[in-house]
Image: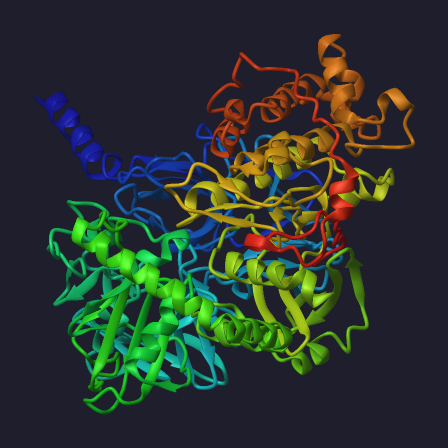
Amino acid sequence: MGISWVWCGVLLYLVLFLIPFPNLVTALPQGYLKASPSTSWTNSLSAPDSVKFRDGSTVRIILTSGSSGLVFACGFFCNQTCKDYLFAIFFLYIDKVGMGKVREDVGPRVVWSANQKNPVSINATLQLSSERGLVLQDANGTIAWSTNSSSKSVAGINMTEAGNLILLDENDAASWQSFDHPTDSLVARQTLDAGQNLTSEGGLFALSVTGEEMLFSFNSNPPITYYSGSSSIDLRDDFNTSASLEVYYNGLSLYPYIYDGSYFYPQLQSLQYVRLGADGHLRRYAWQKQSSEWKEDDILKEYLDYCDYPMACGNYGICRNAQCSCPVPKSINGTTYFKLTNGTLPDRGCSLVTPLSCDASQNQFLLACQNVTYFSYIRELQFTDLEGCKKACLKVCSCKAAILHSYSQNHFLGDCHLLSGILSLKSGNRNSSGDLILAASMYIKVQNLPRAIPSRRGKKRNRFVIILGSSLASFFGLFLLIGILVLLFRKNNDSDEAEEYYLDYVPGMPTRYSFEDLQAMTKNFSKKLGGGGFGTVFEGSLIDCTKIAVKHLNGINQIKKSFLAEVETIGSIHHFNLVRLIGFCAQRSHRLLVYEYMSNGSLDKWIFHKNHEFNLDWHRRKKIILDIAKGLTYLHEDCDKKIAHLDVKPENILLDENFNAKVADFGLSKLIDRDQSQVVTIMRGTPGYLAPEWLSLVITEKVDVYSFGVVLLEILCGRRHFDRSQPEEAMHLQGLFMEKLQKKQLLDLVDKYCEDMQLHGAEVVDMMRVAAWCLQSDYSKRPSMSMVVKVLEGVMDVEENIDYNFCNPPIPNTRARVMPPEVNVDGATTLLDSVLSGPR
C-alpha cells in the first residue's frame, strides 16, 4: 500500500509540472553577452535551447531579458509551417514554479524581426563579433541581414527588460539598437520617431507620425492616407489594464498602466504591445495574468469601421455593412462585367470578366455605380463637369475609374479624381469622417467585346454614309491640309503641356517634384554618380536626409516615350527586387526621375572590373542571380499586365548596401495584356542582349529570359558578352560558351579572378546549364522566369532536351544608325547602348 502511494505521488508530480511544461531550457543566457570573433548560433532544432510550441511554431532562444514570467527573448523563430525562419524578438513565458520551463501552451509573440523580406532556412547562423556586429547568414552562405556595425567596435549585446536589443561598445554606449529599426510592432517604452514607420507584414500599410498626428496610409505611389488624427488614444479593457497611445514631440509612444483599485500607475514590465496588421488595422495586445492569455483590441474601432479600410473587400469589391460584393453582380443586357476572385471568399475582391485592353480602347465605356464612393480621395484635380471627368478617364489608358464629387446636385462643377488602381469601394456617399458628400458619382471602366456585324439594312446606311463622307472629304480637302500643317507646327509646343496634363490625371503616380526642388535636393546637380545615352544620374537627399538618385534625362524628343514608360510602369508596382521610383519631374523641357539610392551601384562594376575591392564571392553571385530572376518573375507573372523589361543587362541591375539585387531602368519596357501571347514592336534594347526574334519584331516576355541568360553567363564568367581584348576566336562569349560546352570544358570559362568560384566549379557549371536553357534560339523552348526561380531554389531541375545551337546572329549596326531618334512607336526608342552605371 505504501509503494502505491509513492507511485501516485510521482504520477501527480508529472501531471502537475512536467506535462504542462515539457520544454525545460536550462541556463538560458540573460541580459548581456560579450562579443568575440567566434560567438555564433546555428538554427538547429536539436539545440538544447530550441522550443516547439503547441501552435506549431518553433524558436531557438539566444538571449532573454529575465528568468521567469513573461519575458522578452531573441533568437530564431518560425511559424506553423517552419519553412522559413526569422531572427526575431518575441515574448516567452517562463514558469518560475516549473524551474525555468518555457510553457509550450503560450506561443511566442514576435514584436520585431530583422529579415522579414529575407527569411533563412534551417542551419542558418547568427554571428556576433567585435568587428562586424550581428551578421545573419543563410545555410548556403548568403548574407541575409547584418547590423552594418563595421565602423564601430562591438563589445557585447544586451536584451533589455523593455525588449530592446542593443549592441554596446567598449564604453557600454549603444552602437546599434532594435528600437531604431521598427518593423510592424511598437512595445512599451519604445518611441516611433518622425521619419520612422511601422510597416505591416507584406508592406501594404504604414503608420507614421507627422506633426502631432498619427498618419495611417496605404503604400501606393504616392501613399494614400486612410486615417489621420488623434494625437492621443486611450486604451482600456475589463482586466485592470490600461494604456494610452500618444504623439509627443513628433514621436509615438505606448504608455501602459495598471489599476490598483483606486489609481492607474505606470506598469514597469512591458506586458502590452501594438501591431499594424496586414489588413491595415492597428491592434493592441495585452497580457492577462489571471488567464495566462493575450487579449486583442482594435485601436481604431471608434474612428474607422470595417468598410473604411483600403482592402476591406479587396480590389473592386464593394463593402456594405461589413459584407462584400462586386460592383454589378448581375448581367447588363446579357453581359457580366465583374466576378468574385474567389467564389467562397467575397472579401478577396472582384475582377473584370473581360480585362481592359489599351489596344481595344474603342470598346471601353464607364459603368455607373450608384451610391458608391471610394474609401479615400487621392488628389484634387481641376474643377470640371461630369462629362469632362468621364472623357478624361477614357483618354488615359491607365485610368480604371473616375469619381466626380461636387457640392451641387446638377454636377455642374466638381473635383474629378481618376484612379489607376481600384482598391475597396464603399456603399454610401460618406467619407471616413462621416461627412456627407453630395452628388458623388463613380464610374468604373469596363471592356466590351467587339461589336457584332451590322445588319443588311445597316450596311446600306453605312454605304450611303461612306459616299456622303467621300464627297465632303474632297470638298474640304484643302481646309484639312491647312489644318494638318497648323497642327504639325504646334505639335511640339502642345505635346509637353498635354503630357503634364495627363500625368496629373493619373492617381497612383509617384510624388511629383518641381525642377527647383530637385536642384536643391542635389545641390544643383553637383555630385554625379553615372551617365549614359539617356541622361546623367546625380546623388541627392530628401528633407529627412534619405539619400536618393536623380536621373536627368537628355533630349526630349528621344526620351519622352521612355520617360512616360518608366513613370507609368514602375510608379504603380512594388517588389523588393525592383528599384523603387520615388518621384518624377515633368516641367517644361525638364524630365527627371527620382529613385531610391543604391549604395553599391550597378552590377557591371562588380563583375567586369578586375579589382579585388569590387570582387563578388560565389554566394553573393548566386544570391544576385536569384534576385534578378525574382524581379523579372514579378514583372512577367504577378502584375495586372505582363511587363517586358526589354533592356536587361548588368548596368540595369543595382545593388543595395546588403548586395540585394534590384532591376532598374524601365524606359524601354512594354506592357502586354494577359490575353496577348505576343506583340509587334520596333526593335529596342542593347546589342548583345537582344534575342534572335527581335529580327522579326514579334516579341514576348521571353526576350527578357534570353537577356537574363546573357547576364547570367557574364556573372559566371566575369567578362562581357563581347570583349575586344580577347583573341579573335574568344571575343564572342556565347560562341565560346557553345564551343566549350561541346568539348565539356566549361570550367575553363569560370571567372579566374574569383577563387571562391573555382572551389565551387561543379555548382557553377550547373548554373551554366540554366544559362544555356535561357539562350535557346527558339523562344518557346526557353523557360519562364518562375521556372528559373524554382531551379535556382532547387525545387525543379533544368530541362534535359536543350538545343545548344543558341549563338545569337549578329545584329546589323545599320539598323541602329538608320533609325531616326524620333521613331518612338508604342514606346519604342532607338537602338542605343545606353548605360546608366553607378549607384542610383
Locate residue 257 relative to residue 602 in the image: left or right: left
Viewer-proximal residue, 492 or 236? 492
Q: Residue furthest bottom?
A: 408
Query: What is the image's colouring?
Result: rainbow
From this view, report whether residue 763 is shown above or below residue 117: above
Pick whichever, 790 or 658, lies toward us.
790
> Residue 402: which quarter of the image?
bottom left
Q: Is residue 196 visible?
A: yes
Q: Is residue 673 left or right of residue 789?
A: left
Residue occupying the far left of the picture: 1
Image height check: is 175 above or below 790?
A: below
Which image quarter holds the C terminus?
bottom right
Q: Locate residue 523, reporting x and y percent.
A: 76, 77
Q: Position of residue 598 (x, y in %)?
A: 68, 56
Q: Quadrant of the N terminus?
A: top left
Residue at x 23%, y 34% (from the top left corner): 19
Q: Residue at x 47, y 38 (%)?
A: 678
- Image height of 153 relative to 46, above or below: below
Question: Which residue appears at 68% of the width and 65% of the height?
Answer: 557
Q: Is 286 in front, or is 668?
A: 668
Figure quadrant of residue 433 = bottom left
Residue at left offset 54%, top offset 25%: 782
User: How many numbered callouts?
Assistant: 0
Asked if residue 270 can be seen in this view, the reply is no
Point out residue 401 in the picture as x, y percentages from the top left corner.
32, 67
Residue 89 placement (x, y as % from top left): 46, 53
- Camera-side residue of 788 and 286: 788
In this image, 688 relative to 213: left or right? right
Measured along the vertical axis of the image, is residue 232 above or below residue 457? below
